[in-house]
Amino acid sequence: MSTPRLLVIQPDETDPPATLGDWLTDAGAQLDIRRAWTVEIPDNLDGYQGLVCLGGGMNAEEDDTHPWLADIRRLLASAAHGGTPVLGVCLGAQLLASATGGRVTKADKGPEVGGYLIAKKDAAWTDPLFAELPLMPDVFHFHADVITSLPPSAVLLASSPKYPNQAYRLGGCAYGIQFHIETTVEIAQAWAHDSPEMAETAKPGTFDAANLTELHADLAETWRPFAARFVQLAAGDLQPATPPPNRTLPLA
């Protein structure tokens, strides 16, 4: 397998690549991590074989206080249109949706916080990245905004009872996941400390070290192979999905 070079955009200092970064490099990828509040976002993906966009505490269109978000959206839209493999995580998924015709709003049923199960949709069983996941994989949530409308071209891959748009694909290889797979116990506890009003909406004991350790072991079992498949996709060793007919991405 070749060594794909991935551009990893970190929109917020509180959400580094962490475990996901380790999984990607362990699978053979070379990472170029750009902390968006300190450096310019590239205009294009020349020299890169994939794009990863991480999470953050801001809204996907909060450009007035986080002006780099507009540049991230433009790059995500360009990647999705151009057929470059993309993985958007939580805020990254919201930015991808916003950039390609979807809608992101405040969560009308309250924040979604803690460890939960999501359910695969029918389309996931033939998807290159999602097919090998279990029917109901473990995820970690920490968000107060949601994707209320997917882009018109999106294929829904996973849902939950509270908020249905948990994972989706655009075209053959641009993915958004509304949950976190990159966290560590320490990161999750730091978020709870910094956002106590959100943490209080979780089940009792969610942020206890023992419970988080068990959850993150489950996350690793499921999502480490997922990250490896994304690297294979970027390297050209895994074929992209075949998009449904008559579905095109809207212009950004």
Image (cartoon, rainbow, N blue to C red):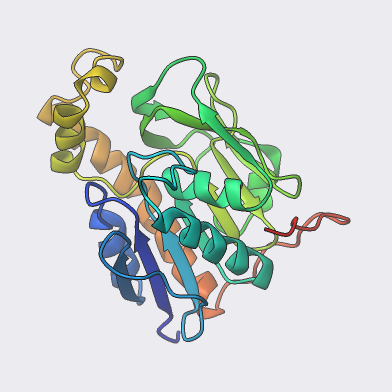
Above/below status of 199 relative to 105: above
Q: How many marks?
A: 0
Return the residue nearer the eye: 154 or 138. Answer: 154
Residue ID at (40%, 58%)? 68
Pick the front one: 232 or 65:
65
Above or below: residue 130 compared with residue 48: above
Q: Position of residue 4 (x, y in %)?
A: 43, 80
Measured as percent of width and height from the top left, residue 136 is found at 50, 33
| Residue at figure coordinates x 39%, y 35% from the top left | 138
* Relative horizontal placement of residue 169, taking residue 166 as reference (left or right): right
Relative to residue 167, is residue 18 depicted above or below? below
Q: Relative to 50, is 183 above or below? A: above
Q: Residue at x 53, y 66 (%)?
A: 75
- Taking depth in this image into account, of 228 and 69 the one nearest to the observer is 69
Q: Please tell me in which quadrant of the rendered image residue 35 appears.
A: bottom left
What is the quadrant of residue 111 in the picture? Answer: top left
Residue, far right: 246
Residue at left 47%, top 67%?
51
Q: Picture coordinates of residue 122 (x, y %)?
A: 70, 39
Q: Is residue 52 left or right of residue 247?
A: left
Q: Is residue 185 left or right of residue 166?
A: left
Residue 133 seen anywhere in this rendered image of the structure: no
Say whether residue 220 is left or right of residue 230: left
In this orientation, which residue lies closer to the viewer: 38 or 136? 38
Q: Position of residue 76 (x, y in %)?
A: 54, 61
Q: Quadrant of the N terminus?
A: bottom left
Quadrant hosting residue 62: top left
